[in-house]
Image (cartoon, coloured by chain):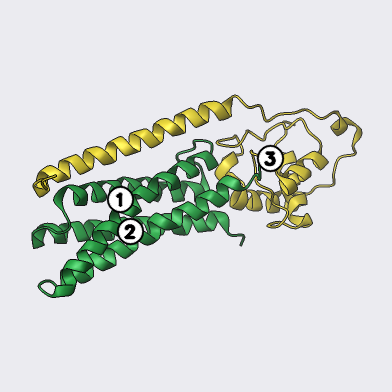
Chain colours: A yellow, B green
Amino acid sequence: MAPLTPMKALGVAVSTAAVALGFAFAVAATLRQDAARVSHRQPTPERWFEPPTPTSPALVARGRALFLDSCAHCHGADARGDEGPDLHDAQVSDRYIANIIAHGIPHEMPAFARKHDAADIAALTAYVRSLDSP
Amino acid sequence: MDPTWWAKTHGATTHFPLALVLCSGVLDAAGFALAGRPAARDLHAAGYWTMLLGALGTVPAVLSGLWLTKGGVLGHGALRLHHLFVWPAFASIVALATWRRLVGRTAARPRFAGYLIGVGLAAGLVLAAGYWGGELAIAR
């Protein structure tokens, strides 16, 4: 193939980059549609038989700081959901929330037991619980 | 399936285009600086192929990242910062590799100097994307 002039090649190069970005965003849109079909909310009746976990404003504030560091990039800075689900009014027990944070969800969410210790997970749980409607 | 499989795959695949594009820039810059000497031709040939391979390497890197985020192209926090650099980096690498493929291993010095500036900008974008990707992956 004979080389193109640099200016013609620049036009083709920019067009190719635009097509590549368009292809990537089309794949992304398809993946988002697939993800949206999966429900993340699974009510667990045990919540109603479990005593509420002790909490405090300081613990919630610490949980919020940890959340912004580790969770906000998927659940959104306001925990209203993005790639991950909205965490407000979670219909699950504190133990369930802590377990999900520690061990993750296969194919859905990474485990954080190696990144965060039990105190961190308790703070994160307190923060998620603080998102419930009063 | 290991739930961290896509994270591991993305971590593995991103380093090929990152390393190849940076190497391509260094090799071509050396060839540009040594213009007229015998080594310059070989340096430009190496720069040419590393850029083409680097651009090919962006495909699995981008696709594995999209699978990892379930199609998220922006996100929040460190992920948003990662993506703000990833997409311009991806587009610029594809454009640079296409230009290089069409023009050949080298071009007139002013044009090639412009190409090297483009590679430098793309390298900066790739490094910034890599930094924020590392912030996501490494526990602090």
Pointers 2 and 1 in contact (C-beta within 8 Å): yes
Identify the amino acid type marked 3: Pro
Identify the amino acid type marked 2: Val
Q: Quadrant of the N terminus of chain B?
A: top right
Identify the amino acid type marked 1: Ile
* Host chain of mark 1: B
Dot 2 surroundings within 10 Å: few (below 14), some, or many (20 or more)? many
Pointers 3 and 2 in contact (C-beta within 8 Å): no
Residue A5 lies left or right of residue A93; in this view the side is: left
In the picture, residue B114 is in which quadrant? bottom left
Q: Which residue is at 33% across, 50% downward?
A: B55
Disc 2 designates what residue? B21
Disc 1 designates what residue? B93
Residue A117 screen position, x and y as percent: 75, 58
Disc 3 designates what residue? A106
Q: Which residue is at 51% across, 44% downward?
A: B76
Q: Which residue is at 27% across, 61% downward?
A: B120
Q: What whole-number distance in Å separates the C-alpha atoms at marks 2 and 1? A: 8 Å
Dot 3 surroundings within 10 Å: few (below 14), some, or many (20 or more)? few
Q: What whole-number distance in Å separates the C-alpha atoms at marks 3 and 2? A: 34 Å
For the residues tagged 2 and 1, is the chain the same? yes
Local secondary structure at mark 1: helix
Residue B83 screen position, x and y as percent: 43, 46
Residue B114 lies left or right of residue B131; in this view the side is: left
B137 or A20: nearer the eye?
Answer: A20
